[in-house]
């Protein structure tokens, strides 16, 4: 399968715990995006990378959130001290640089904070 | 913040009927895209229309764009039960180079 993959698909955690999600983009894509989607809403942009450089972060991305893409391939999104309001679907997408609006989405990681 | 506003929020039709969904947006755009999302899963790209295009077809899909009214519509003809999903419009703003801005989505139910 050469699409975008995300791991884990589901995560249940207790409030206050840290969680980390992984995204593997399509191999030749150098742009990688993270979105958050809450129930009944559309995805909202969190941050994006071009290769290993994080070029933009949304105001939605509080200090408890950090994202990395150390070698310009896979990316991780970490949430520290999770809160119930962090419960959502976290979507990753990748795109080729020249056609950055053509984004290919992964299946998402559903986070439930109890 | 979400730019697109889809209308209606929910739509229920009989298999074989056509489904029309509308989207309005607020800023100048480079293109507008429609995505489908099956329950609890990732987004699938359906169709893209550029700001200088007025209508585009892809299989059973027809999308229109009216930049003067800042609105778009997606028509699914001869609907099937498998079309049951949530549909989102997403805009790529003029001058922006970083993100898609999605609406809240429309839930389509196609009854067999």
Image (spheres, coloured by chain):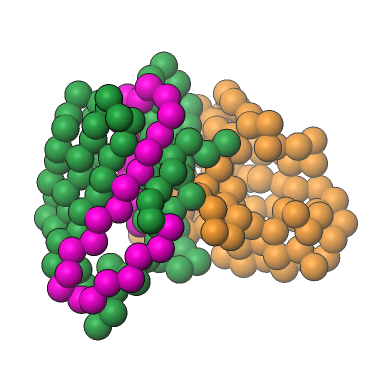
Chain colours: A orange, B green
| Screen quadrant of the N terminus of chain A | bottom left
Q: Is residue A8 rendered to the left or right of residue A42?
A: right
Q: Is residue B77 or residue B37 the one in the foreground?
A: B77
Question: Which residue does the image show at 72% across and 53% down from the upper left?
Answer: A86
| Screen quadrant of the C terminus of chain A | bottom right
Q: Is residue B17 rendered to the left or right of residue B87?
A: left
Is residue B53 placed above or below A38 in the rendered structure?
A: above
Is residue A77 visible in the rendered structure shown here?
Answer: yes
Residue B75 in picture, x, y percent from top left? 20, 54
- Residue B56: say if magenta: no
Write down the region rendered in magenta.
Answer: B9-37
Question: Which residue does the image show at 27% across and 25% down from the upper left?
Answer: B68
Residue A72 in picture, x, y percent from top left? 53, 33
- Residue B16: say if magenta: yes
Q: Main secondary structure of the magenta part?
A: strand
Residue at the far bottom in the pictured view:
B112
Q: Is residue A4 or residue B18 the one in the foreground?
A: B18
């Amino acid at each position: 399968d050469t699409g975008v993959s995300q791991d884990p698909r589901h995560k249940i955690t207790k409030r206050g715990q840290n969680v980390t999600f992984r995204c593997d983009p399509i191999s030749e894509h150098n742009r990688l995006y993270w979105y958050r989607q809450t129930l009944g809403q559309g995805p909202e942009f969190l941050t994006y990378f071009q290769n290993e450089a994080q070029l933009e972060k949304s105001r939605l991305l509080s200090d408890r959130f950090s994202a990395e893409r150390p070698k310009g391939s896979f990316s991780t999104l970490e949430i520290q001290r999770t809160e119930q309001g962090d419960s959502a679907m976290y979507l990753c997408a990748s795109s080729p640089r020249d056609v950055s609006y053509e984004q290919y989405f992964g299946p998402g990681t559903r986070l439930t904070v109890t | 913040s979400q730019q697109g506003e889809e209308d209606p929020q929910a739509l229920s039709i009989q298999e074989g009927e056509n489904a029309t969904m509308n989207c309005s947006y607020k800023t100048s755009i480079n293109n507008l895209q429609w995505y489908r999302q099956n329950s609890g899963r990732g987004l699938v790209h359906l169709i893209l229309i550029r700001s200088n295009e007025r209508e585009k077809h892809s299989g059973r899909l027809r999308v229109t764009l009216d930049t003067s009214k800042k609105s778009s519509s997606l028509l699914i003809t001869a609907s099937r039960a498998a079309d049951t999903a949530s549909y989102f419009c997403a805009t790529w703003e003029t001058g922006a180079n970083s993100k898609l801005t999605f609406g809240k989505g429309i839930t389509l139910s196609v009854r067999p």
